[in-house]
Amino acid sequence: MSTLTSTIFFSPSLLIPARTKPTNSPNNQVFFHKNDHYLNRIVPQKKRASFCIKAQEQKVEEGVPSATIACPTVRPKFVLFGSSIVEYGFHEGWAATLAHLYGRQVDVVLRGYAGWNSRTALRILDKIFPKHATQQPSLVIVYFGGNDATHPQPDGHGSHVPLKEYSENMRKIFNHLKSLSEKTRIIFLSTPPINEKQLFGDRFPPEKLPKTNESHRIYSEEGLKLCKKMNIKAIDLWSKVQEREDWKEVSFIDGIHLTNEGSKVVTREILKVLKEADWKPSLYWKEMAIEFEEYSDTPIGPGGKPIDPHTTRFPLGVEWD
């Protein structure tokens, strides 16, 4: 079996481990430098635990630490997968809030593609979520449907996907995600409503609108029905966004993409699902371990009482859920 040893490529302060031929190193020891952050790309997770990792004595540039590491840190991974509602989620949105809340617990990975429908997502699915990946996501939050719900054009172009095909595409997407790992969890976001007047103005007569709030309702309900059949956690965004009376005025930047207020609905509902799910281990932010907590000085609050880092996020006093 080939062994991994540390090989220095003389690039500014960069140490790169490389696969080499079998060596006669004592006890088949494997050496890595502390700064080899891409170790996970090289050593399969199942094999990593069997390695004896020690710091190799080597000359490094001044100021570059070379402390011994026992094993690289591998955080759980949440992947946000969908169209523009996902891609724009870091613009003062729900994705940014999730990344903030899980900042010391989870790597939140954005895979958002504006304009995509379920047909496009299915074509590229294995490239985004390969089954042979070393680390599989702990959670995938999926959103497709808004572009599918666009009305068909006479020339056949556009993003419309017939309702039956949309349901079948989402079924295949869910099955693929389920197959990644027994511990990969899924949350589906249904198609949210739109403000037709804000989105289209007076550019189209009512009967010629490219999409309507009603078409979004139909695709939302189809996705929710599928999730119920497949036992997948789902959030009815079409209904949840419309619960407040002024939803048309406060929820959208342009009639379809979410403002900060609209995003708060998405964040609240996602956290509610994570809190109430009976998943083991829990993926709720207040119940997950905090990375390197044992190396941090415990913050002290008023009256000399320790502050629990699980229950505090900046800014203090904000109720996140």
Image (spheres, rainbow, N blue to C red):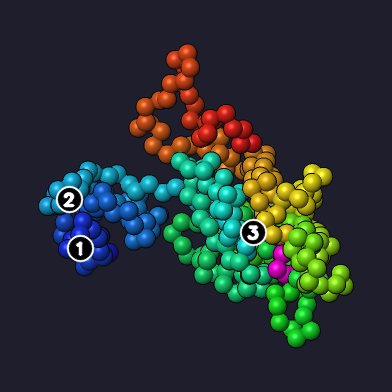
Instruction: Tell me which amino acid carries mark 1.
Output: Ser
* Residue at 85% in and 72% down: 205
- Lateral position of residue 266 relative to residue 222, left or right: left
Alpha-carbon distance for marks 3 and 1?
40 Å
Circle 1 sits in a helix, a strand or a loop, which is it? strand
In the rendered view, does 158 fall on the left or right side of 124? Answer: right
Determine the image quadrant of residue 191.
bottom right
User: Does residue 304 appear anywhere in the picture?
Assistant: yes
In the rendered image, which residue does mark 3 sit on?
A: 85
Point out residue 202 in the picture as x, y percentages from the top left corner: 80, 68
Give the residue type that dot 3 points to.
Answer: Ile
Q: Is residue 309 above or below residue 240?
A: above
Residue occupying image coordinates x 41% and y 49%: 74
Residue at image x 41%, y 33%?
A: 293
Q: Which residue is mark 2?
A: 56
| Residue wearing tag 1 | 11
Please identify the residue farthest to the top as the structure is shown.
Answer: 303
Position of residue 130 relative to residue 307, above or below, is below
Q: Nearer the viewer, residue 303 or 24?
A: 303
